[in-house]
Amino acid sequence: MLQSGTKLSIARLLKIIIINLLTITLVLFTVALIRTLSLDRNVGLQLARWEKTRNISLAIDHRQREQQMEKFKEAIRIPTVSFSENENNGTALREFGSFLRKAFPTVFSSKLVHHQLVANYSHLFWVQGSQPDLVPYLLLAHLDVVPASESDGWDAPPFSAKEIDGFIYGRGTIDDKGALMGILQALEYLLMKGYAPRRGFYIALGHDEEARGGKGAVNIARLLKERGVQLSFILDEGLAIVDGVISGLQGPAALIGISEKGWATVKLSATMAPGHSSMPPRETSIGILAAAINRLEENPMPRLFGYGPERQIFEHLAHKFRLPLNFIMSNLWLFSPLLARVLERKPDTNAFVRTTTAVTMFNGGIKENIIPAYAEAFVNLRIHSAQTLQEVLDLIHSTVADQRVKIELIHGFDPLPVSSADERAFGFQIVKKTVLEMFPTVTVAPGVCIGNTDSRHFSDLTRNIYRFAPIWFKPGDPQRFHGINERISKKNYEELVEFYFSLIQNCDIKNVPEAHSSGHEL
Ligand SMILES: *[C@@H]1O[C@H](CO)[C@@H](O)[C@H](O)[C@H]1NC(C)=O
Ligand SMILES: *[C@@H]1O[C@H](CO)[C@@H](O)[C@H](O)[C@H]1NC(C)=O
Ligand SMILES: *[C@@H]1O[C@H](CO)[C@@H](O)[C@H](O)[C@H]1NC(C)=O
Ligand SMILES: [Zn+2]
């Protein structure tokens, strides 16, 4: 009796457990499905009542259009190259300063604008607002470019600004002279049309962003800090409008960078007594170091997908994917471990899953018959938002786990804080509104920059840093960035001017409106 009774209750218990599990699964999937169907984040604030601002239209005639394009080409032709941290083209950087004065005479003569040269070549503009109680913002760009050589296979010399099929070719067309010239051209037009902002703003143009910004951006940020400036938000370069670049994503998406990965360059070295190769020790410094490097490659940093801002990013974009991807992406609370395993298979998406580890240099040995006394290797890591530099260093130590290998941090910083992308976030919503006014069919979503920008030097001045310009990235275009045949279409450059022209005006409201109650949150 007792026996069979126990059996019976175990069977019943199992049944209850299974039914419960099924019910829980069903509920989870129903919640997931409702979330999938209800997520169209382009709605929301766009339906709300926005405060009216003076709305100056950008009506320019044919001659002005030609002139604005000529100025842009002239900017590309000045080879403002940053060769390394301590080597730039001072002549070109100085020439660029004179060029700006000539190209934008209204900006440089307006009583509303205060201009200052910083660290010899960088520029800081303050555009005074009529309502000092509105917290100013900062538009950031850089005038230096990475080196380029025609012999790498360019279709046009990289500093020629040659026009081919409606595109301007040249180093700096997308990184970052398009935005730089777009901002100043927009301000030039606005001032010519008698515009005076309500909200004051800064424009900062660094001259060494491609060499870490240690002179330009760092000194500009220091100046602003000394003056006690707090910023409403910063808009810098970074992400773009991607169209056909992300597989599975239907239609174009404007990705606004809300964070940047951190950075660590670590030097590993091993030192042994040198000797003759006829009587070698069991291990040499090269062998010890190679084994350590191998352990780092065999043991990637932990999967952190879903612990950073990935969740809000994918949830914004989910409705633009087909089933089942939209279902999975809008429910990362359930599926992130699964998705992480898919994403980590490709290098470009693996970058979103974890801190990446790249062994970039390895040196050791001086002669074929001498036991090397010393070997060294450099490892470059890009730190995921959910990890700190210190955690990464600790993991390197525990993975290498060999006292004979010396581990030194050469250069590093934590990932940047995650800026808000919610409905109260002034900067994010202003950028989004401006994008949607120009491109109503584009999906606007937050994103994370894999690379770094000058804006990271300004993190003491605001918590709200956004990295975006409405540059269209179509298939093949991401490779042009720092690569060969960097180019922008003439139309896209005109769109950049228009974007900053209306963005500046859109910033003149006091606050973003209250969220339209869309009742989506579950
Ligand atoms: C400005 O006016 C144009 C047309 O006159 C309109 O399409 C646009 O939405 C307006 N922008 C704002 C911010 O009111
Ligand atoms: C530096 O820039 C000047 C133009 O301002 C150019 O003539 C010169 O070739 C550049 N030098 C290098 C090394 O690129
Ligand atoms: C500016 O240039 C001068 C020489 O022309 C140099 O001594 C000084 O260090 C430069 N300043 C910065 C911040 O690079
Ligand atoms: Zn750049």
Image: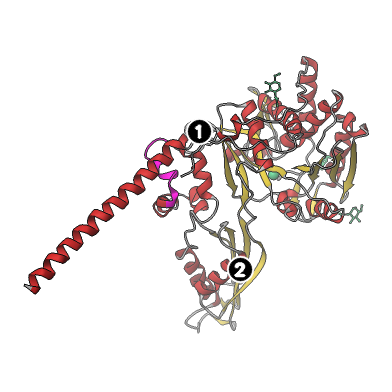
| Quadrant assignment, res 514 | top right
Q: Quadrant of residue 432?
A: top right
What's drawn in magenta, residue-wise? 321-333
Q: Residues within 10 Å of mark 2 (few under 14, many from 20)?
A: few
Whichever of callouts 1 and 2 sits on the residue coming sooner in the sequence is 1
Give the side of residue 71 with respect to residue 48, left or right: right
Q: Is residue 324 found inside the magenta-colored segment of the image?
A: yes
Residue 140 sits inside the magenta stretch:
no
Q: Is residue 301 left or right of residue 485?
A: left
Crowding at dot 1, Cα within 10 Å, few <14 / some 14-19 / many 20+, comes out as some
358 vs 22, nearest the viewer: 22
- Kindly indicate the quadrant of the structure image that contains residue 142: top right
Location of residue 366 in the rendering, given as x and y in whole percent from the top left corner: 61, 72
Disc on res. 244? 1
Q: Secondary structure at mark 1?
A: loop
| Quadrant of the rendering where the N terminus is positioned | bottom left
Q: Amino acid at mark 1?
A: Gly
Q: Which mark is residue 390?
A: 2
Tell me which image quadrant ligand 1 sits in. top right
- From the viewer's perspective, tell me whether residue 38 is left or right of residue 12: right
